[in-house]
Image (cartoon, grey):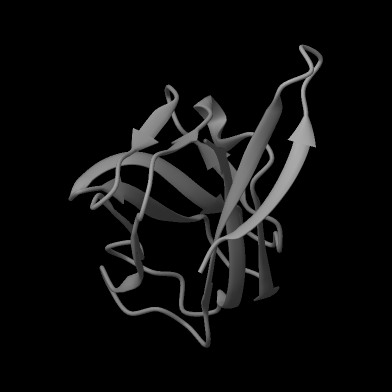
Amino acid sequence: MPAYTYTVTGSGRALVTTTVNGSQTGSATANLVVQRYVFAGTVTFPAGLIGSQGTAGVPAAATATYHISKNGTTVGTMAFAAGATTATFGMGSATTYLAGDVLTVVAPASPDATLANLAWNFVGSH
């Protein structure tokens, strides 16, 4: 369930920030869907998923890239570099999910067996 916080922009209008949280206990198997989230309203994630965070309890031995999809089409990535416990995110352009759209996070086709115990949040707004 997303958490909502309110911030005020420079123009003086309120902007609602939405955070979609997820986690993975242990290591992933090939192409495992580690998260499915259906939206109840409109949320836009910024290009590059700016503000999003990801962490691993056990670092990867090799780079591991998880795919972030909108209704089955990849729109972004969450990657853990070899030896890293912090994720980097990629999203080529701002992506809007509407009510009923499904966000999925899918493990790599060749997962890193050492990467484990992940937690992440994707920060968007509406």
Q: Position of residue 36 (x, y in %)?
A: 32, 67
Count of marks placed on residues: 0
Q: Which residue ends up furthest to the front in the rendered image?
A: 13
Q: Is residue 65 positioned above or below 90 on the image?
A: below
Q: Is residue 34 positioned above or below 63 on the image?
A: below
Q: Nearer the viewer, residue 12 or 122?
A: 12
Q: Residue at x 19, y 49 (%)?
A: 71
Left or right: 9 as drawn, with respect to 99: right
Q: Residue at x 27, y 42 (%)?
A: 74
Q: Position of residue 83 (x, y in %)?
A: 69, 62
Q: Nearer the viewer, residue 79 or 102?
A: 102
Q: Position of residue 23 (x, y in %)?
A: 54, 74
Q: Which quadrant of the figure has residue 34?
A: bottom left
Residue 76 in sight from this viewpoint: yes
Q: Position of residue 20 (x, y in %)?
A: 53, 58
Q: Is residue 12 positioned above or below 4 on the image?
A: above
